[in-house]
Amino acid sequence: MDIKKLKQRVKTWHEGQTYRVFRDGKFVDDSYFDAHIIPVYETLLNAGADETLRCVGLTHDVVEDPNPDDFEDYILSLDDGVEIVDMTADVTNVFTSQAYPKMIRKDRARKEAERLSQIPMKSKCVKLADMIVNLSNQLNESKDDIEDKRWCRRYAHEKREVFTKMNLNIEKSERSVDNDRYTVFCVLYVQLQNLLREIYDKHGW
């Protein structure tokens, strides 16, 4: 598979989107592709993920936003395209405010955590990498100068709830058939566990 070509296509799909990062003592807007998508890809790469998992690391946010018309046709033309499309759907947030405008955030977050506990282990690998990147900013934030402390704390609590359910519903058969991916899952699970512990210790939550 031509990963370089896929990266360019994903970059085009996310063109114009920004990602908030904490840099030099303040939040700044950076390229979504460079600041989030590539770090998720690299987190999977460093954990030993195979090419298909890394491809989903690149595509994991495409369906939720910007949801281009040519996404499915393009991905299905690739090797393992069906698996990539299915896994991308697994990690795409279902309980959004747009889909459930009358449901409060806390309830949506709880239902999304329950849904994610049911997705296949291979898809959980990508979600773990996504959460690691999203939460890493909080290690760089100043405890005194953090922007919107309540939002950051709520976000960390939501991700901790997802984390506590990530090791549920992994069938023994799934572990044995997909042993290499189970190893990746364990590496990322421990990495996220340590990251959450560091965040909570740093902020005194």
Image (cartoon, rainbow, N blue to C red):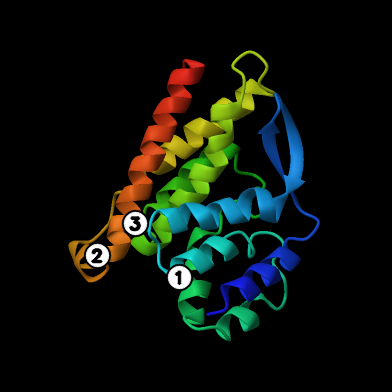
Is 175 left or right of 27, judged from the image as shown? Answer: left
State the image coordinates of residue 138 (x, y, percent, origin top left).
Answer: 56, 30
**Mark 3 sits on what residue?**
184
How far apart in space, not on screen, are marks 1 and 3 (Cα)? 12 Å
Q: Secondary structure at mark 2?
A: helix
Q: Mark 2: few, some, or many residues within 10 Å (few <14, many ≥20)?
A: few
Residue 166 appears in the rendering = no
Query: Which dot marks residue 51?
Result: 1
- Residue at 64% x, 81% y is 74
State the image coordinates of residue 18 (x, y, percent, origin top left).
Answer: 75, 48
State the image coordinates of residue 69 (x, y, percent, origin top left).
Answer: 72, 76
Q: Nearer the viewer, residue 51 or 14?
A: 51
- Residue at 60% x, 38% y is 104
- Residue at 43% x, 54% y is 46
Total numbered labels: 3
Task: Relative to 141, say whether 55 is above or below.
Answer: below
Is 20 left or right of 59, judged from the image as shown? Answer: right
The type of residue carrying mark 2 is Asn
The type of residue carrying mark 3 is Val
- Residue at 27% x, 68% y is 178
Locate residue 70: give its quadrant: bottom right
Q: Secondary structure at mark 1?
A: helix
Task: Relative to 42, say whether 179 is above or below.
Answer: below
Q: Earlier in the sequence, mark 2 or mark 3?
A: 2
How far apart in space, not on screen, are marks 2 and 1 (Cα)? 15 Å
* Discs 2/1, front: 1
Q: Given contact means CB atoms under 8 Å apart, are the residues at marks 2 and 1 in contact?
A: no
How far apart in space, not on screen, are marks 2 and 3 (Cα)? 9 Å
The type of residue carrying mark 1 is Glu
Q: Secondary structure at mark 3?
A: helix
**Mark 2 sits on what residue?**
179
Q: Mark 3: few, some, or many residues within 10 Å (few <14, many ≥20)?
A: many
